[in-house]
Image (cartoon, rainbow, N blue to C red):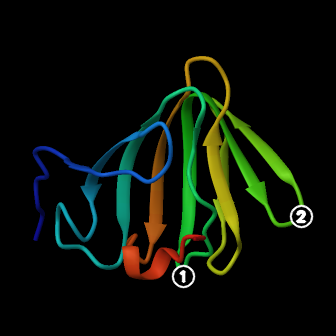
Amino acid sequence: MARHIQQPTVIEAAGTPPKLIQEYVGRVNSGTDATSIAHMKSPEGWVEPGQTPEFDEYTVVLKGMLRLKLSDRELDVHAGEAVIVSAGEWVQYGSPEEGGAEYIAVCMPAFSMDTVHRDE
């Protein structure tokens, strides 16, 4: 059965300074465990703790640049580009450039605080 999602839920974000997370599909907004889809807006200078999630994360950058620190390298993902981070891979996200970044993140299975495994 089709479900119309009329608005997202704003979710508290990790990292400094705070970013805006608007979850459209996921455990919080739609009660969906299989997938989460969120629109993210991170300000210039935002960095979140590193994490080793149990989910695959697919990210499409809409504006700006998103920097990923991986265990073996750094990767800059610019507007119009995408990146896939596999479950079990350590990653730290940030938006160091002026204007920050705006992106869509899809997690499979859906994002969960119990399965993100953030660094202390």
Disc 1, SS: loop
Disc 2, SS: loop
Instruction: Tell me if 2 is positioned left or right of 51 in this view.
Output: left
Between the residue at mark 2 and the residue at mark 1, the CA separation in whole angstroms equals 19 Å
Question: What number is the disc on residue 36?
Answer: none
Quadrant occupied by the C terminus: bottom right
Which of 19/107 is in front?
19
Instruction: Tell me if 46 is positioned left or right of 30 in this view.
Output: right
Amino acid type assigned to the residue bearing label 1 in the image: Glu
Which of 103/93 is in front?
93
Q: Residue at x 30, y 52 (%)?
A: 12
Q: Residue at x 25, y 71 (%)?
A: 27
Look at the picture and state if 42 lies above or below 13. above
Q: Quadrant of residue 70?
A: bottom right
Earlier in the chain: of badge 2 and badge 1, it is 1
In the displayed orientation, state which residue is furthest to the front: 120
Q: Which residue is mark 2?
A: 72
Quadrant occupied by the N terminus: bottom left
Circle 1 crowding by C-alpha within 10 Å: few under 14, some 14–19, many from 20: many
